[in-house]
Image: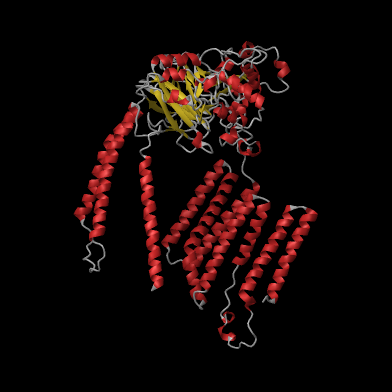
Amino acid sequence: MFTTGSKLLIGSSVLATIAAVVYGITQNEALGIVGLVSVACAMAFLAGVNVWAGDSNLSALDTTAVATSEASDDPPGASIWPMVFAVGAAAVLLGLVTQQSIFTIGLVILLAAGAQWAVQAWAESASTDSSTNAAVRGRLANPLEYPLLGAFAVGGIAYALSRIMLWLSKTNTIVAFVMLATIMACIGFIFAARPSLKRGAIGGVLSVGAVAIVAGGVAAGVDGQRYIHVYETIAADAALVCNSPEEFEVDEGASQTVSTKSGTYTISLTADGNLEFDVPGPVNAGAEAISMPRSNANNIVFRNDSGEARRLTLDLGPAPVEEGAAAEEEGHSAGEEHGDKSDRNLTCTPLVEDGGAQLITVKFDEPSFAYADDAEAYRFYVPGTDAEIDVVVP
Amino acid sequence: MQAVETTTTLKSVTSSRLVRTLVAGSFAALLAGCATDAPQDTWQPKGSNARMINDLDWVVFSIAGVVGVVVFSVLALALWKYRDRGQPIPEQTHGKPALEIGLTILPALILVGIAIPTVGTIMDLAETNDTECIVNVTGQQWWWEIDYPVQDGCGGIEEPIVTSGQMVIEAGTKVLVRGTSRDVIHSWWIPSLNGKRDMVPGRIHTVRLEADEPGIFAGQCTEFCGLSHANMRMEVIAMNSTDFAIWKANQVQDYVAPVAGSLAAEGESTFISQCSRCHQVDGLTDSNDELIISRPDQNVWSGAAPNLTNFMTRNTFAGASWDLLSKECRPGVWDASPSTIGAAYLDGVTDSCLNEVELREWLRNAPAKKPMYADPESLEATDGLVRGMPYLALSEDQIDQLVAYLLERK
């Protein structure tokens, strides 16, 4: 028979279902329908549990039940996990109709709270002694909880430190963190040298330190990071940079080594000022140009052994004409464009010091014969020298 | 008692069925090794490189076979001789150093014995300085582009040749395949000519090929590369030097436009309007006599589509997955003897030998024939670019025109 509690839950579920249908017909809006259907499902689930458990009703005439029924056992301890589980479930439902990130966070909360809840419930059935049950729970859960909590704590501290680092100026960061590291080393030394120190004192010092770091991180994060100069890229003014052997801002601090040691094209500027190229396997005997596939990210290592800082430039043909500038361009032949390098589509490496190397990735959208009348297109050259190599794109 | 007997009988029947299934499965697997029509059989080398691998395989498998027989025999003997017959548990000993050291040294010696020819073979296979012809291959979803750069090798190539799906080489010539990929990792493998070589985007890889005599050698991509990985095939066509010279000359001939007013001429117009934005036909011009340059990078995720300049000189299409030759004509090329295969291949695909049904199916709805990511509604991840050939909604008249036009591309 259905108990009073079951009837209430069944009725709630039916009501929520009707409400969902009515809402759906009148409002035609997904979020509300999902919410009401979720309520209906939740109520139906609870009603099912209630019916299955018989509402835990005991007959008033059953006098032995006072001592023998499950209700006579010690009640389970207070637990926060059902509430956290509910928060997770709500986030999952909300995430399904809003954002995937909310769904993911909800799922993590749901699984973690579910696991904790299950472990706690399992541990509480181990014996009638609550301290024993707590020990049972700890034996199962602590090996997982401590590393995870430790990881979160370390992660939080590290993140806070990074915010502080980005907030301070470069110089102050070095000074501050040298001092911080010294203080931490000193505290560690004191803890090690004085084993008689009370655990409370040690915990207090560590807690105050952790709170201070996190608070500093929060404050630094809120205030924002220091000004960090954004360097210009070659693409910002390729026509100027790629045609000059001079040093520009883009060249400052450029790496002079590459990790790629094989499997790429290599172009070297030799001591006598010539460009030589190499590829895996034998070089095409009889070929005067490098052959590179079309529409492909071709990686080229440029090595400079010329004795002076140089860059490698690639001429990719006439620069695309921007809308609005088309009228001005009319009448300009390809030959005229060659004289003015600003009309060329160029890319290049940063300045490479003598003995250094740089990697450049280039892509050719059209075959060479598209530029059959353009002598400068698809050509590697080194500004400030006469060295050049043609590229054939089949 | 009856229940126990029934359970025992059921277990016996189940066990018997399992044994029968295992035996039948093993027998079927064994018989599969006897297939004669197996063009990708690694045990039938047709060139020096594949033969090196095959020779090494025999050494390694022979040693492994002997080891396997010895190990399983000893295991079976121990299981049978010391099976549980109710005897008391024997005296337990804590290790036997001499036996343990011996059983460590013996496998180590066997491995060293295997390593010597293995390393030697690997180094021999990696050698490329002796190659006489360079061919570039570029993989993309789901076909191979093959190009021949300008060089003195390959009997001399004065202008680049671009083709796809089928690599033509001279028999008896060591060919350097220099490869890369435009999108994801692919792997080049012609089993009867050499081992596999992964083609990684942004990197250049080399592998050497050599065919003993003229023939067609099949292969396929062997690195899972997406939806139509299984349909990414290729062939190497080896021919004698005379035929190879003819093939090279044919590949760089000037474009010949269809006769005005013909169906093929209409096909040229259809090709320009529907196909040329991705597919290059060298020498094709527009109404202003300007060269038409395809821009597959604006339409296709890999940035490339097969060059169709000499389409009918190949005999497969769509990643070498389907024959351009009809079933009746195919054996005339694929089963030709080494002395006649070159001439048969050079005939190309004629009107009477065209596999028109499948070519039309392809033109009618390419994604329906070969799984590809070409649905315009699901291309957000690729910024609207297709992977493979999209559905072009061509009319039957347009398909007629294109077939007529493509038949002249040789």
The residue at the far left in this view is: B98
Q: Is residue A189 left or right of residue B256?
A: left
Q: Residue at x 31, y 36 (%)?
A: B57
Residue A115 position (above or below residue B386): below
User: Which residue is more in the foreground, B169 or B118?
Assistant: B169
Quarter of the image where one finds residue B30: top left
Quarter of the image where one finds residue B125: top left
Is residue B43 something that shows in the picture?
Answer: yes
| Figure quadrant of the N terminus of chain B | bottom left
Residue A218 position within the rendered picture, expressed as x and y whole percent measured from the top left: 62, 52
Q: Residue at x 51, y 63 (%)?
A: A203
Residue A168 position (above or below residue A109): above
Q: Is residue A307 left or right of residue A116?
A: left
Is residue B276 something that shows in the picture?
Answer: no
Quarter of the image where one finds residue B400: top right
Q: Residue at x 52, y 67 (%)?
A: A119
Residue A312 position within the rendered picture, expressed as x and y whole percent measured from the top left: 51, 22
Residue B315 position within the rendered picture, expressed as x and y whole percent measured from the top left: 49, 24
User: Which residue is more in the foreground, A5 or A118?
Assistant: A5
Residue A190 position (above or below residue A385): below
Q: Residue at x 40, y 16 (%)?
A: B153
User: Which residue is more in the foreground, A136 or A20?
Assistant: A20
Residue A73 position within the rendered picture, expressed as x and y whole percent measured from the top left: 56, 80
Residue A135 position (above or below residue B349): below
User: Which residue is more in the foreground, A184 or A368?
Assistant: A368
